[in-house]
Structures are given as structure tokens and as C-alpha cells.
């Protein structure tokens, strides 16, 4: 199975011809462009001219070896989830075709509609950008997601209590100067879970698409779950802190709460939980994605400083 690095290369001509035979018989590929920002998948935009002369723009999304090994049915599951998102009116790509048995591309693959625009983590108006992000996430959490489609979703709340007791998390925390304080706070402030809601589970600015200052869609739906909305908010807040600073992350959360009309459930707990994922040093995990999207100005020392501010605020808010 191809690695993440290998999936940055364009699909082979042979695979693309097999795809054309499935979705546009008699058509031809005009251009293939790598789409930046994908970490778990190789993503390429493809321009096709159909036999009739009509133009078709699609995205070929190939999963890396991690997904192929750990969840071989990932393409089938995401295809069904994208169908459900379309029915719920959530701005996301629409599914076109799936290589669920890996025979065309050699790895789980789905083909989906092209959303106008691109990922953008260097907006000209940061305030408007943060508010649009918050509004899109609130719309997702408030969507009328059909319960019959929930059978494809895992229940995230079931794993939270186990995670904060796991040996791996404890070991990561104890490498940080405030590790014992973090562990104690997580243990003492585990919230009572609210009614499970559809959450993206990987909501960060790199998984959104923008055109002319407007958010046109949310991408990367390989792992949505039923869980706590505050998880998505905290997950995005971490990236916003590292990209723009803690004040931006706070503005994002405040606007989200204004839009939903409700305060988040134990936000400091979720901030700390997210922070523990990359202890003791987040730079090597986060920076490659930021740099791939053009933010080469974000340095390792700045990333570490902002990461510490994020943790310090969460601990202070737990008191």
C-alpha cells in the first residue's frame, strides 16, 4: 500500500483510464493537480472533458497505508457518510465513485465533487475568517443528521474515559513540566457527556475550503463520530492558537457559543485533552501541514510558546 509521501504523486495513467471508464466513458483527462493540505490522504484535482464535450472537475482521494491497514473499509464508510452529509445539507463534497476493493488505485479511494476554492490558513481578514469557521462548525453540530445514517459512526464518548487513563497518554504527559497537573485536572474534570452529536473529529482550517473570503465546504470526512461538540471546538482551537495565537482561538470559541446560544461543556477539559495528543512537543506534528499550505513563517520556537500558552490557559480555567 502507498505511503503518505508516495500519494503526493499523481495517480498513474492506467488507474486514471480505469476511472474514466467508470465515471466518464469516452472522456479524457485534461489536467491533474495535487491539492495541498492532505495528511491522511493523497488528494488530486482532475479536470476531465467528457465525450459530449462537457467539463467535469473531480477530486481523487486516495488513503495512505495507515488507513488501508487499520480500516480497510474506510472508502466505503466515507462514501456513505458523504451521502448522509448531502442529505443533511452540510457543505461537504458529494461522492461520485468509490474504489472499495482497491483494484483501481491499489489503495482505498473515493472520487468526489470539486469544491470551489482552496484551503487557506493565511486570510487577509482574520476576524472574519474566525467567525466564518465558527459558524460553519456550529451549522455542522446543529444539522439534522438522520439517525439511520449514524450506524456508520463510532461513539467517541465511550473512549474518552479510557484514553485519559491510558499508559501512552500518561507517559506523554509526564514528559511535560506540568504533566502531573494536567493528568490530575483531566481526571477530576471529566464531564458528563451531552447528547451525542455528529462531530467532524478532525476539524481544523486545513480541512476547510475557501473562495473569495467565503467558506465553501468542509473536507476530509474519513473519521466523523458521534461525540461532544466541544471536542471539535477544542481541536480547531489548538491549530488556531499555533497559527494565529491564543486570542484568535478564544475569539473562535466565543463566536461559536454566540451562534449556538449555549456555553460549551467543560471547554478546559477538551482543550487539555487535545493538548495531550502531541505532548511534549507539537512542532514536528503540526508544522509540516502548515508549511504545506504556505505558512513557512511559523517557527518551531513560536509553535512551542503558543502551545504552552494554550495549556496554561486551560489549566487556569480549570481552577
Image (cartoon, rainbow, N blue to C red):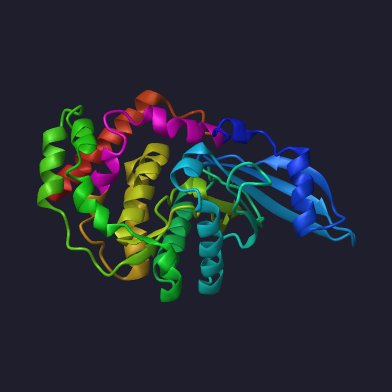
- Nearest the viewer among 297 and 21 is 21
Q: Is residue 288 magenta?
A: yes
Q: How many marks?
A: 0
Q: Residue at x 37, y 67 (%)?
A: 259
- Percent across and percent down for residue 282 are 34, 31
Q: Main secondary structure of the magenta part?
A: helix
Question: Quadrant of residue 115 in the image?
Answer: bottom right
Q: In the displayed orientation, state which residue is furthest to the right.
A: 52
Pick whichever, 159 or 233, lies toward us: 159
List x then y, in percent, for residue 208. Answer: 52, 52
Q: Position of residue 185 (x, y in %)?
A: 12, 45
* Apparent side of residue 70 relative to residue 35 in the rendered image (left or right): left
Left or right: 194, with 34 as reference point: left
**Is residue 136 at all visible to an observer of this figure?**
yes
Quadrant holding the N terminus: top right
Please give the name of the residue rendered at 66% of the width and 33% of the height, measured from the top-left corner.
9
Residue 101 at x, y percent in the picture = 60, 51
Res. 192 image quadrant: bottom left
Please determine whether, in this image, residue 123 is positioned above or below residue 261: above
Q: Which residues are magenta?
A: 271-293
Q: Residue at x 74, y 51 (%)?
A: 19
Query: Which residue is found at the position 51% from the left and 28% from the top?
Result: 296
From where the camera sits, is residue 91 visible?
A: no
Residue 307 belongs to magenta span: no
> Toward the viewer: 70 or 95?
70
Reply above or below: 77 against 118.
Answer: below
Amino acid at each position: 500500500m502507498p505511503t503518505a509521501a508516495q500519494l503526493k504523486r499523481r495517480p498513474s495513467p492506467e488507474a486514471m483510464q480505469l476511472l474514466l471508464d467508470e465515471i466518464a466513458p469516452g472522456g479524457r483527462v485534461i489536467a491533474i493537480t495535487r491539492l495541498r493540505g492532505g495528511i491522511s490522504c493523497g488528494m488530486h484535482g482532475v479536470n476531465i472533458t467528457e465525450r459530449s464535450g462537457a467539463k467535469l472537475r473531480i477530486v481523487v482521494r486516495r488513503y495512505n497505508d495507515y488507513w488501508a491497514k487499520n480500516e480497510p473499509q474506510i472508502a466505503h464508510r466515507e462514501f456513505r457518510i458523504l451521502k448522509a452529509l448531502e442529505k443533511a445539507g452540510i457543505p461537504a463534497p458529494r461522492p461520485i465513485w468509490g474504489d472499495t476493493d482497491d483494484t483501481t488505485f491499489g489503495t482505498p479511494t473515493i472520487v468526489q465533487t470539486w469544491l470551489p476554492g482552496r484551503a487557506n490558513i493565511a486570510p487577509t481578514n482574520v476576524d472574519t475568517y474566525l467567525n466564518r469557521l465558527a459558524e460553519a462548525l456550529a451549522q455542522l453540530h446543529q444539522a439534522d443528521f438522520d439517525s439511520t445514517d449514524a450506524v456508520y459512526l463510532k461513539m467517541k464518548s465511550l473512549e474518552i474515559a479510557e484514553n485519559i487513563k491510558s499508559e501512552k497518554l500518561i507517559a506523554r504527559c509526564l514528559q511535560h513540566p506540568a504533566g502531573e497537573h494536567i493528568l490530575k485536572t483531566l481526571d477530576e474534570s471529566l464531564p458528563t457527556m451531552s447528547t451525542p452529536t455528529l462531530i467532524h473529529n478532525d476539524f481544523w482550517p486545513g480541512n476547510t475550503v475557501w473562495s473569495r473570503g467565503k467558506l465553501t465546504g468542509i473536507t476530509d470526512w474519513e473519521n466523523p463520530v458521534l461525540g461532544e461538540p466541544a471536542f471539535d471546538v477544542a481541536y480547531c482551537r489548538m491549530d488556531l492558537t499555533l497559527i494565529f495565537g491564543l486570542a484568535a482561538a478564544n475569539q473562535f470559541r466565543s463566536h461559536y457559543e454566540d451562534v449556538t446560544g449555549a456555553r460549551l461543556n467543560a471547554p478546559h477539559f477538551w482543550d487539555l485533552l487535545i493538548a495531550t495528543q502531541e505532548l511534549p512537543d507539537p512542532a514536528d506534528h503540526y508544522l509540516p501541514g502548515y508549511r504545506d499550505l504556505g505558512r513557512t513563517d511559523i517557527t518551531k520556537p513560536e509553535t512551542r510558546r503558543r502551545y504552552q500558552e494554550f495549556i496554561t490557559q486551560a489549566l487556569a480555567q480549570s481552577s
